[in-house]
């Protein structure tokens, strides 16, 4: 059996902080052997139609998706919505609210980075993001380009990460709201990359318990940032909380050490695959 999986349910295009157009992203996924994929841009579904059309032409399956930013206690938790109706009014109004939140945060972060010595921050970040959602990844790029940080990681540890000078605590949706919008739109709510939040086991269990209580369906068990050990931990948590399991690379662009397209490990046999929720 191949040790590379052909399903990838967490990908980004240039409608948020990915590099590729949805069209090119789907072509690349197809070339990498992926047969089912979702586009999960940050707080926008703008690329889904194009991705869907390209996937249809190539004969592979496309699932409408989104990655919603939420605030849980003092943490920014990402919730992926899969198999959603992108035109559902609750999803459309939810996205509009998140976009407003992002716009305000862009102004706040720009002001702070400017105070750290980055000139014309607002104009530069708008030019860099083009028509896509502006994310901290764009600000990180500016810091690297200006020589303020040697790479993305250091841009986050010096300026943009939690508690750093250019960090702004945003008024994102709550976990409950994100799950509500996704569920109303007929979709499946998935906690993205649970290993990335640096939560203690106790806190992670609290998050999963609340998420499940709000009607959340699944967690990402296999994702690029998870080690083999974390895959086992998340498999056990999925079983403990009776959640389904998802698989997604979180691919943004070539050259990122993590998150390579089409290079995922298979879902452990003990998991209930998330796609069972829309194929049965
Ligand atoms: P935002 O949704 O605007 O808060 O931006 C979050 C995005 O920034 C993530 O989706 C990643 O693409 C990127 N990001 C967050 N933390 C890091 C990090 N430590 N190193 C590199 N990229 C990061
Ligand atoms: Mn991102
Ligand atoms: Mn994320
Ligand atoms: Mn992502």
Image: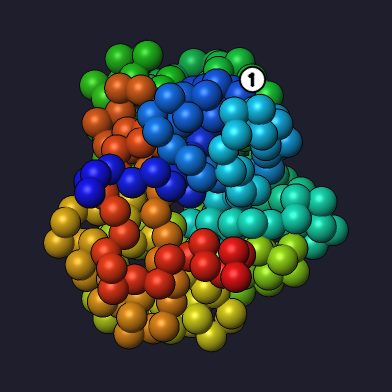
Please tell me which residue lies in front, 60 or 207. 60
Q: Do we see residue 10 in this rendering?
A: no
* Residue receiving disc 1: 130
Which residue is drawn at the image coordinates 64% and 56% (left, top)?
83
Q: Position of residue 159 (x, y in %)?
A: 35, 36
Which residue is drawn at the image coordinates 43% and 77% (left, top)?
243
Q: Position of residue 106 (x, y in %)?
A: 59, 36
Locate residue 201 relative to residue 5 in the image: left or right. left
Q: Which image quadrant: the C terminus?
A: bottom right
Badge 1 residue CB within 8 Å of ligand 2: no
Locate residue 102 relative to residue 158 in the image: left or right. right
Disc 1 crowd, CA 10 A, few/some/many (<14, 14-19, 20+)? few
Q: How many marks?
A: 1
> Helix or strand or loop: what does disc 1 sit on?
loop
Q: Position of residue 10 (x, y in %)?
A: 47, 46
Q: Position of residue 132 (x, y in %)?
A: 63, 29
Please tell me which residue lies in front, 41 or 175. 41
**Model colouring:** rainbow
* Residue, far right: 89
* Residue, far front: 1
Which residue is drawn at the image coordinates 48% and 40% (left, top)?
35
Which residue is drawn at the image coordinates 30% and 28% (left, top)?
256
| Residue 116 vertical position relative to residue 267 in the rendered view, above or below | above
Q: Do we see residue 3 in this rendering?
A: yes
User: Which of the 4 image quarters holds residue 82?
Assistant: bottom right
User: Which of the 4 image quarters holds residue 203?
Assistant: bottom left
């Amino acid at each position: 059996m191949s040790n590379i999986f052909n399903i990838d349910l967490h990908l980004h295009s240039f409608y948020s902080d990915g590099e590729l157009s949805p069209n090119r992203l789907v072509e690349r996924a197809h070339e990498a052997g992926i047969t089912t994929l979702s586009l999960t841009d940050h707080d926008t579904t703008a690329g889904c139609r194009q991705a869907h059309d390209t996937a249809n032409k190539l004969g592979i399956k496309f699932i409408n998706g989104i990655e919603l930013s939420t605030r849980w206690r003092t943490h920014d938790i990402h919730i992926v919505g899969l198999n959603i109706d992108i035109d559902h009014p609750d999803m459309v109004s939810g996205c509009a609210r998140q976009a407003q939140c992002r716009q305000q945060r862009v102004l706040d972060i720009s002001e702070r980075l400017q105070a750290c010595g980055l000139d014309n921050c607002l104009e530069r970040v708008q030019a860099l993001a083009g028509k896509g959602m502006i994310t901290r990844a764009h600000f990180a790029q500016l810091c690297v380009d200006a020589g303020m940080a040697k790479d993305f990681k250091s841009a986050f540890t010096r300026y943009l990460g939690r508690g750093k000078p250019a960090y702004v605590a945003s008024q994102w949706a709550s976990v409950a709201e994100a799950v509500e919008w996704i569920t109303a739109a007929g979709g499946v709510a998935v906690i993205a990359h649970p290993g990335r939040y640096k939560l203690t086991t106790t806190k992670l269990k609290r998050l999963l318990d609340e998420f499940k209580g709000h009607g959340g369906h699944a967690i990402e068990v296999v994702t690029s940032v998870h080690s083999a050990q974390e895959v086992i931990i998340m498999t056990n948590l999925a079983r403990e909380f009776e959640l389904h399991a998802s698989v997604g690379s979180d691919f943004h662009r070539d050259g990122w050490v993590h998150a390579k397209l089409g290079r995922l490990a298979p879902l452990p046999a003990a998991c209930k695959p998330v796609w069972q929720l829309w194929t049965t």
